[in-house]
Image (cartoon, rainbow, N blue to C red):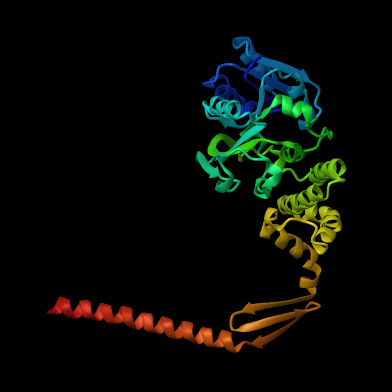
Amino acid sequence: MAKVSVIIPVYNVEKYLRECLDSVVNQTLKDIEIICVDDGSTDDSGAILDEYAAKDSRIKVIHKENGGYGKAMNVGIDSATGEYIGIVEPDDYVELNMFENFYKIVSENNLDFVKGYYYNYSSFPLEKNELVANYDNNICNRKLKPIEYFETFKGGASIWSAIYNREFLIEKDIKFLETPGASFQDTSFWIKVLLSAERGMFVNEAYNHYRIDNENSSVKSNSKIFCICDEMHELDRIYASSKKIVKIINSLKIDKYAWNYNRLTKQGQKQFKDIYLKEIDPIIKLKNYIPIIVPARSIKTFNDVKYQNIKRIFSVQNVGIHKVLCIFGLKFQFKSKKLIERERFNKLEGRVNYLASELKRLKKAVKGKI
């Protein structure tokens, strides 16, 4: 039995795949199995996987018809035999000591999972790594039960910056949602981990380089408008009987729906708006959520969407020294005393600065003549 099974779900990533595989096969922890699930790639990704497998007996390649990310991940988990399961996205790469360090932590502390920070990585136009510390430092480096610490639910899923006890996943029946053609299927997986784990640990070290300049990434796709809803509805179905967990899920729903709305084009936002308001409005009205989990920006996004029609009917703007009141498309302009005084002060300040600079210039000129 390998210490860690590393699952790599692959679909049309020939451009980045070798860099990813090199970072995994050269891990300092040698006792790993590498399960590559080729989800019906139409480029050279499958051939690259076979090439690496021919050179390294630890690599197992599974070629299958395209069924989506969730299905590919479940196939990988079902095929794994290691004590722990790690995930590496095929357009990312990881530090060479990632799995050795993570395995040491989980085995010494008998953990259900350990999770670290990560880097946002881009290679064009210049190579760039930016640290993402996506949870509070005060919960780091200690064993905890996630559901007792609401801070653990803040931030994104980033399931690939962690490793998981395989027996824990089997016992709790934690799998990916297999919605065909869907995206963001890491969302419900990670939330189920947090809700089910008895012993988890977050560490303030980063090992994964998460690529953000892949134009084919699902995050950049506007065809996946309602996929996040499928993920949250799955959680609604599973945990409907627990009031505490419902409030946690509602909190996450406020945040995830706001994120989804903001990533969409104007046309996508129009399509998403109705379900967004329908599901989130009663949660906020009834205060059936946990404020510490919900970022202020997510509440602001909801209010902006909810009241955007009112803003079109009625708005007040400062334009120069005037206040412009817009009602039903009609604009009324008023002089604002405060703005007039501010304008006068700015002009006076500008004149004073000009005179000061002229005085300096004259002093230099006089000194030069003396």
Q: Height in image: 242 above or below 12?
A: below
Front one among 143 and 137: 143
Left or right position of 311 against 109: right
Q: Position of residue 228 (x, y in %)?
A: 79, 45
Q: Position of residue 190 (x, y in %)?
A: 72, 38
Q: Height in image: 176 above or below 336?
A: above
Q: Quadrant of the C terminus?
A: bottom left
Is residue 44 visible in the rendered image? The answer is no
Number of residue marks: 0
Please tell me which residue is depicted at 57% across the width and 19% down the height of the picture.
25
Please tell me which residue is depicted at 79% across the width and 68% down the height of the picture.
307
Please tell me which residue is depicted at 21% across the width and 78% down the height of the picture.
365
Left or right position of 102 against 236: left
Q: Position of residue 177 (x, y in %)?
A: 81, 34
Q: Quadrant of the N terminus?
A: top right
Q: Position of residue 58 (x, y in %)?
A: 63, 13
Is residue 334 visible in the rendered image? The answer is yes
The answer to which image quadrant residue 328 occupies is: bottom right
Front one among 19 and 174: 174
Q: Height in image: 297 above or below 124?
A: below
Front one among 150 and 341: 150
